[in-house]
Structure formats: structure tokens, C-alpha cells
Image (cartoon, rainbow, N blue to C red):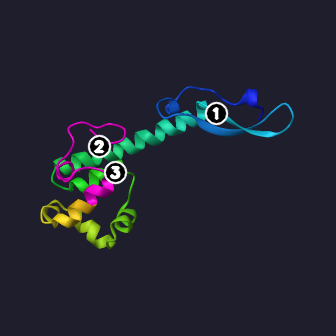
Amino acid sequence: MEIKDVPQDPGILDDYGREICYAVDQNGNYNLVQSIGWYPKNIANRQAWQAIEKKINKAREDILGGKLSPIGFYMACNQMDIRLLAQYMGLYCWQVRRHLKPAVFKRIKKNVLDKYAALFNVSVDELTSLPDKLTRDCHI
């Protein structure tokens, strides 16, 4: 693709910066060129974010319904599964599964809550409650 053909379709990257692409200049040399987006890629990204938001909203409903601890909300926000969260926490998968149960979550030791909070970049108070509103990065 030549530099003049690098797509510049506005989309999901508008709020986050630019994407870097390789393009050929008039001398046939590859150069790094900034792009604000490409229509097909914007559609795919939008669909991916919609799927993520569905998971976040489902986690929120499950927490409000007493089926899931707030850890599930922050897992969804950070696009983590049990295995990944267990690795980051230095725990076994079964331990994280237990922590996802509201009754067990209420009894988690403070040092473990501190570690979860630090991992999710929230305070312990934020971790033990559910945010009132949802934003793209799940922070209030």
C-alpha cells in the first residue's frame, strides 16, 4: 500500500490516538505512517466492544442478583478469565472460583482484597462495591 492509500476513516481510535501502518513511499521504501482508522476494522472493533460490554453488564446483573462477587465485574472490565486472574494473583483457579461466590467474597482476608484491588487498580472500597455507572475502562 502506498502512503497516499493509507486509510483515514474516523472510528474507534479517535479517542485513543493513531494506528501505525507500513506503507511504501514514492521511492519504494517502507515507512511508518499514522492512520486514524479503517472502516472494516472500525466495524470489527465496535462489535468486539459491544460483546465486552455485554459481558460486563451480565456480570453487573449477576452481582446485583447475588450470584457473583464484585471480582466478576472487574474481571469482565479487564477482559480476564479465571486462569489469567489466578496467574496474576498467584492463586489456584479453584481459589479464584471460590472468591467469585458472594458468600466467600465477604470472608476474604484483607491482604487478598488489597492484592485484588491493586491488580484491578481500584481501592478496596471500590472493589467491595459495584460502580453506579459503566464507562469504557470501567472506572468511575
For marks 2 and 1 on the same chain, the one whose residue lies earlier in the sequence: 1
Label 1 belongs to which residue? 34
Callout 2–callout 1 Cβ contact below 8 Å: no
Residue 85 pos. (x, y %): 35, 62
Q: CA distance from mark 3 to mark 2?
A: 9 Å
Report the amino acid beneath label 1. Gln
Q: Quadrant of residue 86?
A: bottom left
**Quarter of the image where one finds residue 25:** top right
Vertical relation: 90 (above or below) 39: below
Q: Position of residue 91 (x, y in %)?
A: 31, 72
Crowding near pointer 2: few (<14 within 10 Å), some, many (20+)?
Answer: some
The residue under label 2 is which amino acid type?
Asn
The residue closer to the viewer here, 85 or 124, is 124
Q: Quadrant of the N terminus?
A: top right
Counting from the top left corner in percent of width and height, residue 80 is at 38, 56
The residue at the point 34 percent across, 51 percent down is 76
Q: Please name the residue shown 50% across and 32% down the image.
A: 12
For the magenta stretch, what is the residue range? Answer: 116-140
**Dot 3 lies on which element?**
helix
